[in-house]
Image: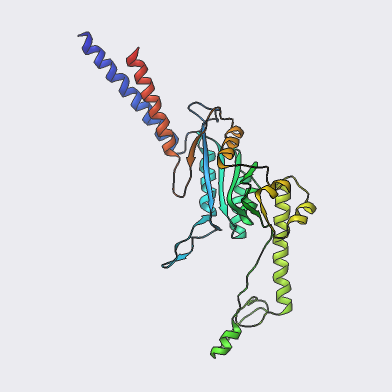
Amino acid sequence: MKTYLKILLTFGVLTLFILVIAGLIVFFSTGFGSAPSLGGGLGGGYVAVIPIKGEITSGGCGGSLLSGPVACANADDFKNSIEEANDNWMISAILLDIDSGGGSVVATRTMTYAVKNSKKPVVAYIGETGASGAYYAASAAKRIIADKNSITGSIGVRMNVMQYYELMSKLGVNMTVIKAGADKDVGSPYRPMTEGEQEELQRIVDKTYDDFIETVARNRNLTPDYVRSIADGKLYLGSEAKELRLIDQTGSFDDALAIAAKEGGIIGEPKVKRMDSGSSLGGIFESEASNVVIYSIAKYLGG
């Protein structure tokens, strides 16, 4: 009889644990749960690693049947990953894993705002390349770590205008443009660009360049004049960028991870959750919840 009661009691405890944990998993994975970040232990021991790989874009990645898919960093996906990491109480800090030469101005700015507005500390790591727009986004991070032989910098703006009117003329092909508005076809590939049109496009590029310099200066606590003096589009090695104060220190990915963990108040070795495209943070809580169940059951049965 005593054995039967003990089995029944054990079954009841197990059922209660499962129901409680299942409820907590649903609660937190649906985004309704929130709690303050805790250093180490069950809560807050994770660093979310969010990649910026390939061209920064607001749309889809390019590619063809011959080249296959091309790596790119979608700004909206990136922003959503930052927000998801901020909303998940298991995450204490964010580490950007960067290998990109930049991309769209607007997409880059979207990423920069997401980093700057993060509620949790963001650290950037530049591996192979973190130049132009990728450095723009990285500058908003609390700390920037780069491999000493990485390629960074390239602070500048470029606009490409393709023209093939001479080729069309040789082929005997003509394009007639009917427009309303004198500047409606600025940059047309079907005719030479006028001096006034080139000046107008240069004005746009210069204004974007000024914004780039001001943003980097503000994010890195430098003067605009100083940033302008080194912002001639030149590429810098990580070691050179450190001397120019464009990054905080040189080091490896593991070094950057340790710094992100420290910024997040994590005690001991951090756990890592890679936020690749389409991934979710829901599995973090499920894993930790399972550990709690196993530990609690073992403790009950053992004592």
Residue 294 appears at what percent x and percent y? 36, 24
Question: Left or right: 130 with respect to 217?
Answer: left
Quadrant of the rendered image containing residue 102: bottom right
Looking at the picture, tell me which residue is in the foreground, 247 or 20.
247
As drawn, the residue found furthest toward the top would be 2
Residue 93 appears at what percent x and percent y? 56, 37
Residue 68 appears at what percent x and percent y? 43, 63
Quadrant of the rendered image containing residue 4: top left
Residue 6 appears at what percent x and percent y? 26, 13
Residue 162, relative to residue 32: is it above or below?
Answer: below
As drawn, the residue found furthest toward the front would be 149
Instruction: Classify the position of the C terminus by image quarter.
Output: top left
Q: Residue at x 66, y 82 (%)?
A: 192
Residue 108, relative to residue 255: is it above or below?
Answer: below
Residue 159, relative to residue 197: is it above or below?
Answer: above
Instruction: Classify the position of the N terminus by image quarter.
Output: top left
Question: Left or right: 66 with respect to 105?
Answer: left
Quadrant of the rendered image containing residue 144: top right
